């Protein structure tokens, strides 16, 4: 009886990932969350009721703020993502690309 593998062999070692890139993505996600809360807090401090005040306007404004936060994360001068990345980068091993560069 011939037993062939139904699926390719499974490696017990996890696949190599670029953990530096994952850290950067997480740091930008944190900055996006912070900016979203910042914008929401700034909107809550308005001077009075909006003339066009309705739940649809509020929802649209919330969606706009979320998009501004998403687009701004990692691209602004706030530096929150940079600070988070710097803080946690010592816990992440260097990427394979970085190791190859240092070997030359």
Image (cartoon, rainbow, N blue to C red):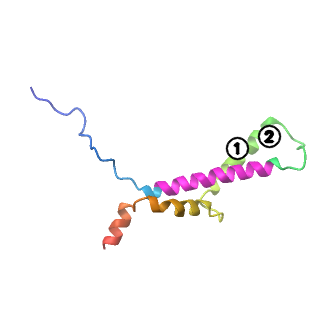
Q: Residue at x 71, y 47 (%)?
A: 64
Most foreground residue, 7 or 86 = 86
Question: Mark 1–mark 2 contact, CB under 8 Å?
Answer: no
> On the rendered structure, is 16 left or right of 47?
left
Magenta: main secondary structure equals helix
Q: Position of residue 55 (x, y in %)?
A: 80, 35
The image shows residue 78 at horizontal and vertical percentages of 66, 63
| Label of residue 76 in the image | none
Residue at 26% x, 40% y: name it. Answer: 10
Whether residue 32 is in magenta: the answer is yes
Q: Position of residue 6 (x, y in %)?
A: 22, 32
Q: Is residue 71 toward the left or the right of residue 64 in the image?
A: left
The earlier-in-sequence mark between 1 and 2 is: 2
Question: What residue appears at the point 35 percent right and 61 percent down from the top-left corner?
Answer: 96
Q: Quadrant of residue 91?
A: bottom left
Please check the rendered image and state whether residue 41 is part of the magenta-colored stretch, yes or no. Answer: yes
The residue range painted magenta reads 22-43
Report whether residue 70 is seen.
no
| Label 1 environment density (alpha carbons within 10 Å; few <14, some 14–19, many ≥20) | few
* Image quarter hosting the C terminus: bottom left
**Quadrant of res 95:** bottom left
Q: Quadrant of the N terminus?
A: top left
> Would you say residue 41 is visible in this rendering?
yes
- Give the Cα separation between the discs numbered 1 and 2: 10 Å
Residue at the left extreme, as displayed = 1
Depth order, front residue of 103/7: 103
* Residue picked out by circle 2: 57
Q: Position of residue 67 (x, y in %)?
A: 66, 49
Q: Which labelled disc corresponds to residue 63?
A: 1
């Amino acid at each position: 009886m011939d037993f062939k593998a139904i699926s390719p062999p499974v490696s017990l070692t996890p696949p190599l990932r670029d953990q530096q890139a994952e850290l950067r993505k997480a740091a930008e996600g944190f900055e996006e969350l912070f900016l979203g809360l910042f914008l929401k807090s700034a909107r809550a401090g308005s001077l009075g009721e909006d003339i066009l005040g309705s739940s649809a306007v509020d929802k649209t404004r919330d969606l706009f703020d979320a998009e501004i936060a998403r687009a701004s994360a990692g691209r602004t001068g706030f530096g929150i993502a940079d600070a988070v990345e710097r803080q946690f980068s010592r816990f992440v091993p260097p990427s394979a690309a970085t190791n190859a560069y240092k070997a030359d």
